[in-house]
Amino acid sequence: MMTKARSAVCFFAALLMLLTAGDGFGKIFYSKKEAMDMAFGEQARVEILSLFLTDGQIEEIQRQAKVKIDSALFSFYVGKQGEKLLGYAAIETHTVRTRPETLLIVLSPAGELRRIEVLAFHEPPEYQPPARWFEQLYRRPLAALDFNAEVQGITGATLSSRSALDSARKVLAVFQVAVRKGQN
Amino acid sequence: MKKNTKQLLKLGLVSTLLTASAAGWGIEKPKTVEDLWKIIQAQQKEIDGLKAERKPQGETAASAEGETKSAAKEKDDIKEVSRKTDILSQAVEKLRTQLVIPEEPELKSEYGLGPAASKVYKVDKGLSIGGYGEGRYQAFVSDADGKKDNSDLLRFVLYVGYKFTDNILFNSELEFEHASTGKTGSVSAEFAALDFFFDPKVNIRAGLVLLPMGFINTLHEPPFFFGNNRPEVERRIIPSTWRENGAGLFGELLPGLTYTAYAVNGLDASGFTSAGIRGGRQSGSRALAEDWASVTRVMYVPPSMPELLFGGSMYLGNSGQDQIFAVPVGDEISFQKVNAFTQLYEAHMQWKYKGWKFRTLGAWGHIDNAGTLSAAKGQTIGKSNFGWYTEIGYNIAPLFFPETSQYFAPFFRFEKLDPIATAPNGFPDIENLDRQIVQFGLQYKPIPNVVIKADYRNFTAKRGSVPDDFNLGFGFIF
């Protein structure tokens, strides 16, 4: 009788664990369409610029961005209105602690950091950096995007702000090495 | 020439391989980003090789006409390979982003409201407009008892929301019922409330609020329930659409565990009838607020099994509203105030799995002083009432068209309800109101926001008959 009761308790405990396990806080805030609208406006035409990075370019990007590049294929979304270039955007996904965060990183036509939006965040919401934290990164040059330079840290969201900063540096470095140099 | 032939053979082979790899999508798509990336790398390598070999070749072949043609063909081939590389690299980017965010905006339910009603929660700032509508043709197929077939634009609803800041927003539902106020239609605010966001766990809502009970009262957009008519249990026992003025808290306490708790003006017992408490709703219009009520709902969606939903809610409050009821006692009239303490409890469960959608809900209510109210109203007011229903549907469209995003589901629903489950002493039960309904039909959604519905309902009463009907209708949200 005791064994049956224990089995029942174990069963319900296991069921409870199963039901409560997993990624409960995961949240997708925007679709790709909405991300492009935020980046370039609803009237813009969006093209994809695929970059096939050479070993030399990867090395240079890694040196400038201080982050590891894990793929030689990088895509920029290029916003245009008629012949006018509106800017560049990248959708970057990285792991914060154990779960991913997806950012939209928008650059001006000249390659200046203009906007960052969180598209999806799967860690608990208290780890998500607020919009005002991202704002301090805008228009700063690549070298200044560093906690040791001009960027203020954020209590309680250290890992997520660090990974966001890494992503911003990566996108700026890719632009400078593979797009701007190609233009010059 | 021999070298040239070899070159052409090589080009042909590469082209064939590439065409097979790209055209092969129709048969078997690359499953992962890595598969596509390998294809792209191979293509890029071939393009580079071809370009390198073509340079000296072009110089020697310039004199011979045949060789010029082959050079032109090589150029076309390279252009074609480059085009395919572009397509593949774009496909890689699409796959990459699809893993983390959807391509198109999706209307999603927020805080228990319908997906279209939740639009304002997703805007950055400023105005948001959404809406829904539904219309139907109703034909009485048996036991019509004088009822006439009819068609009706049941509802056209506009959601208007305004996000003032990240922490404060207003949301509302303005409803036009039955097409024209010149006929039997009406225009009403179904809800109009301010939300104050403090923390995911604790937020405040104040205004005209939808009572968080059951499935339908807060989420009644037509693509999301089976049939042209809302379940009778969620009309007569839980009187949807039920809204009152009030304020309260809502939030997510633990992953997947959400709650809503409001204090609202109580029901008005003078509107209760044999058919239930529906007539006691005050709908925020100059509502009597002598008596207040509490309504609380808890819902749980297990984080590891988001296809499951469990919920329960309760409503508790007096409904007398300090009014004096004229109660016949013998030959005299006694003027009395009653508390008419009203309770309503419900529990519900939903399961969605691989095209299946299953829902079940049970509700039970109790009204104190039902005898006094019955005497004052001259009709039996149920001391207790109950209702339950269960329904299941299955999307069969993917069985015939595996790639389709359309939805085509036959469904079945069974309901049982009785607004006079217990009659007060000295008052007769009205057995015609003790009903069960068997309903089946079809639900077709060419796109998720638009629905075409057809269904048949067979009513059975404990005594007497109730008209059975066939309904054909449409609904949409935006």
Image: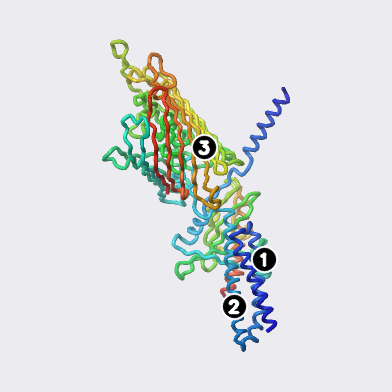
Give the percent coordinates (x, y) of residue A10. Answer: 69, 31
Q: Secondary structure at mark 2?
A: helix
Looking at this view, name the residue that lies furthest to the top: B330
In the rendered structure, which disc, 2 or 3, sits on the residue that comes first in sequence? Answer: 2
**Alpha carbon of mark 2 to alpha carbon of mark 3: how far?**
60 Å
Q: Residue at x 38, y 13 (%)?
A: B426
What x and y, as percent, mark residue B338? Answer: 37, 19
Q: Are marks 2 and 1 on the same chain?
A: no
Label 2 – label 1 distance at C-alpha: 38 Å
Q: Which residue is more in the foreground, B52 or B330?
A: B52
The residue tagged 3 is B392
Mark 2 belongs to chain: B
Mark 2 and mark 3 on one chain:
yes
Residue B416 is situated, as x and y percent measured from the top left of the image, at: 46, 28
Instruction: Answer above or below: position of B409 versus A153.
Output: above
Is B315 placed above or below B31 here? above
Look at the numbered disc 3 and give the secondary structure of its residue. Answer: strand
Q: Nearer the viewer, mark 2 or mark 1?
A: 2
Residue A47 spot, x, y in % from top left: 52, 65
Q: Is residue B55 left or right of residue A131?
A: right
Please name whichever residue, B328 or A165, is drawn nearer the observer in this view of the structure.
B328
Residue B182: tell me if it is visible: yes
- Mark 3 vs mark 1, CA separation in Å: 59 Å
Read off the chain for label 3.
B
Q: Amino acid at mark 3?
A: Ile
Label 2 crowd bin: few (<14), some (14–19), many (20+), radius 10 Å: some
Amino acid carrying label 2: it is Lys
Residue B75's disc number: 2
Q: Residue furthest bottom?
A: B63
Circle on res. B147: none
Location of mark 1 (residue):
A63
Q: Residue A89's image quarter?
A: bottom right
